[in-house]
Image (cartoon, helix red, strand yellow):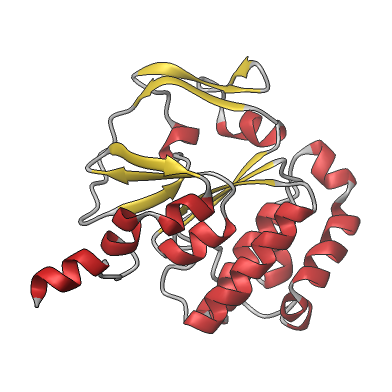
Amino acid sequence: MVLDLDQLRRQVAKIRVGFELWIVFLQQEQLLQPPLRGRIVLDGAPIQSLAAHSIVERGVVLVPEGRRLFAGMSVYENLLLGAYTAKARAAQAKSLRRVQEVFPILAERRDQAAGTLSGGEQQMLAIGRALMSLPRLLLLDEPSLGLAPLVVRDIFEVLRQINRDGVTLLLAEQNARMALELAHRAYILEQGKVAGQGTGPEMLASDHVRRAYLGYVTAGEEASEK
């Protein structure tokens, strides 16, 4: 799969305070609104003007920030909503078994209202719903937001396995260490501009990244403070 952002420019109303570390760059709004200029090209075909459901049919699926589940509906009903394209509906039973193997807790909570799940369970459900759509490219916006460290670790281990199974991940994440340990390629955005890029290991070894995002103090800075 090849995703190309060609001279893409977008006006985004949502401004976030502080820094953001994005593993590549894509936001939910970029699936729902056309850019001011430039193109988003998937496997040689421009998709920036397509309707959201048409983009999903091409295998690009979003796990949104905040999960955005249907709280009053059951776990099972939320999962079925992910399988609404013709191809996904045909594979619904197989996909459901796969999701329940990845997240066994969702099988246990099958008839429970999504709004009564814990934060970690809701994130699992959001990822499971996306997997029901048979993604080739899975977009994840802040999957660790508001979750306990142990839950975050488990979620990222699942993401690693999803990637090993052949699904490309495009991740926007505030947990720099976890994101860089997962990423094959990383981009740092500061004030809306790319401030650094490289492989995950390269970014983890960068003095700038270690100082600004991981809380490390370099030897030179420690000496100057003394």
Please give the name of the residue rendered at 44% of the width and 52% of the height, measured from the top-left corner. Answer: 203
Report whether 177 appears left or right of 122. Answer: left
Q: Position of residue 94 (x, y in %)?
A: 90, 57
Q: Position of residue 155 (x, y in %)?
A: 61, 70
Report whether 157 appears left or right of 118. Answer: right
When the figure is inspected, residue 153 is found, relative to residue 53, above or below; the finding is: below
Residue 68 seen in render: no
Quarter the N terminus occupies: top right
Report whether 196 appears left or right of 28. Answer: left
Q: Position of residue 97 (x, y in %)?
A: 87, 65
Please give the name of the residue rendered at 57% of the width and 75% of the height, measured from the top-left corner. Answer: 153
**Towards the viewer: 204 or 43:** 204
- Residue 150 occupies quadrant: bottom right
Q: How many marks?
A: 0
**Towards the viewer: 93 or 219:** 219
When the figure is inspected, residue 98 is found, relative to residue 6, above or below; the finding is: below
Report whether 27 appears left or right of 117. Answer: left
**Towards the viewer: 20 or 136:** 20
Quarter the C terminus occupies: bottom left
- Residue 3 occupies quadrant: top right
Please give the name of the residue rendered at 64% of the width and 60% of the height, measured from the top-left corner. Answer: 127
Please give the name of the residue rendered at 71% of the width and 33% of the height, measured from the top-left corner. Answer: 57
